Image (spheres, helix red, strand yellow):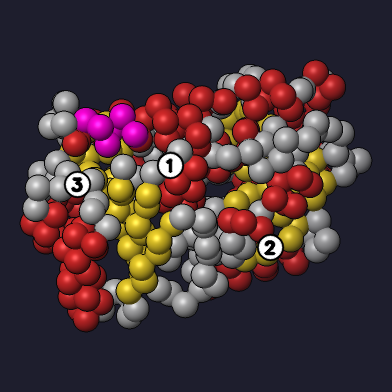
Amino acid sequence: MNILIIGQGQYGYKAGCYHYTKHLTSLGHKVVFLCNDYHLKKVEVPNVKVIYVDEPNSIKWRLRFSKLIKPILKEYKIDVVLFEYYKGCFLNAHLFGKTPALLDVRTGDVAKNKFKRTFFNWLIKFESFFFTRTITLSESLAKKLKFKEGSYDIVTLGSDIFDDSLKQYDDINLLYVGTLKQRDIHKTVQGLAKFMKERPQAKCHYDIIGFGTPEEESHIGDLIKEHNLEGIVEFHGRINYEFLKPYFERANVGVGFVPMTPYYDCQPSTKIYEYVLSGLYCIATNTYENKLTVDSRNGVLCDDSADSFASALIRYYDSDRTKLNSEEIRESMSRYLWANVISEQLLPAFERACHK
C-alpha cells in the first residue's frame, strides 16, 4: 500500500506519526510524509519519504501545502491518505479526489473556556464529514465529539519499549516526559518536596523532560530552588524521541500527571504507555482514561494536587516493592505496543476506508 501521511509538526517530533511511518514501512508499505519544517534537526527513517513545507502557520504555507497534495498523489500513486487534524483541514479534502482520506483526531479541544471548547469540538465533528472516515484514540473521545456510530475507527495510543532491562525498585527514580503546557507539572515537584519531608530517608531523583511556556518552565526552576531540590530534580527541556532511552533506563517510576478536568478526562496519555511498556511503575492522575489502564499491577492513581501526589509516593514507598516485577508491568499493557496497534487497528482502518 502507498500511504500519504499529512502531519502538522516536523517529522520525528510527534510520537504517533513517527511510529506510524516506522512500523508501516517495516511491514513493506511505502510512506510519504508531508509536514511543516520548523528547522529542527531532521529525523530520517529508512524508506520514509519526507516532504517539508517551509514557513509554517502562514497563509503562504497553507497555499504551498495545498498545491503539493495533488502532485504527490499522482507521483507516488497514493492508495490512502491519513490527515492529522488541524483547524480548517476540511478545505483540503476536495484535493484527494477518489483517494480515500482518513482524518486522524488525537484530541478534543482543551481550551479552559467552555464556550471555546464546545465550539471547537463542534468544528472537529463538522470537518470530519469531509473525509472518508475518521480515526480517534478512544471511545470516550468519539462520544465526546459526537462522531456518528460507524463513521470512525479506534486507533489507540501506543509505545515501543525504551528499556527492556529487569528493573529494581529500591530507590525512587521518577521520570516525566511530555508537554508542560497546562499540565500543572509544578505540583509534582511540590509533591516530591512534601514526600521527602515525610520520608527523609528515601533516595530520590526526578527527570523532567518537555517544554511549556516560559512562565511554566521558570516556575518549575523556581520551585526546585525554593525546596532545595537541586541535584534531585533535573529539568532538561525538550529532548527528541530518539534520545530518550537513557532516561527510561535510569527511571523506575513514571509520572502521568494531568489536571482532572472534563477536557482531559477522555484523553489517554502517550506517556502512560511509554512508562509501563518500559517496566516503570506509574503514578497517574485519576482520570477516566487513566483508570482504564493504570491498576494495581502497574501503578497507583492520585488526584491532581501536590498533597495527593505526595500521598501516592508514600503509598508506593511504604508498599512491598520487592513484589514488583518489570516484566509483569510490561505485560499488563502489551497490546499497546506500536507494532500491535499498527497491525491490529490502523491497517484495518485503512482497509475499511479503501473499501467504503
Q: Is residue 219 visible?
A: no
Camera-side residue: 98 or 177? 98
Q: Count neighbours of disc 3 (C-alpha within 10 A) and say few if under 14, some if 14 to 19, many if 20 or more.
A: many
Precedes in sequence: disc 3 or disc 1 = 1
- Residue 317 image label: none
Residue 125 forms part of the magenta stretch = no
Q: Quadrant of the N terminus?
A: top left
Q: Secondary structure at mark 2?
A: strand
Q: Count neighbours of disc 1 (C-alpha within 10 A) and say few if under 14, some if 14 to 19, many if 20 or more.
A: few
Which corner quadrant of the image does residue 11 belong to? bottom left
Q: Which residue is mark 3?
A: 101
- In this view, the mark in front (2 or 1): 1
Give the residues in magenta. Answer: 347-352
Q: Is residue 241 visible?
A: yes
Q: Quadrant of the C terminus?
A: top left
Precedes in sequence: disc 2 or disc 1 = 1
Residue 351 forms part of the magenta stretch = yes
- In this view, the mark in front (3 or 2): 3
* Place of residue 150 in the rendered image (x, y in percent of width and height, measured from the top left): 16, 26
Quote the CA–CA distance across marks 3 and 2: 40 Å
Q: Which residue is mark 2?
A: 235
Q: Of the residues shown, which amino acid type is indicated by label 3?
A: Ala
CB within 8 Å, label 2 to label 1:
no
Q: Which residue is mark 1?
A: 28
Precedes in sequence: disc 3 or disc 2 = 3
Q: Is residue 58 above or below residue 1?
A: below
Question: Which residue is pictured at 79% across the width and 59% down the height?
Answer: 229
Q: Is residue 202 left or right of residue 332?
A: right
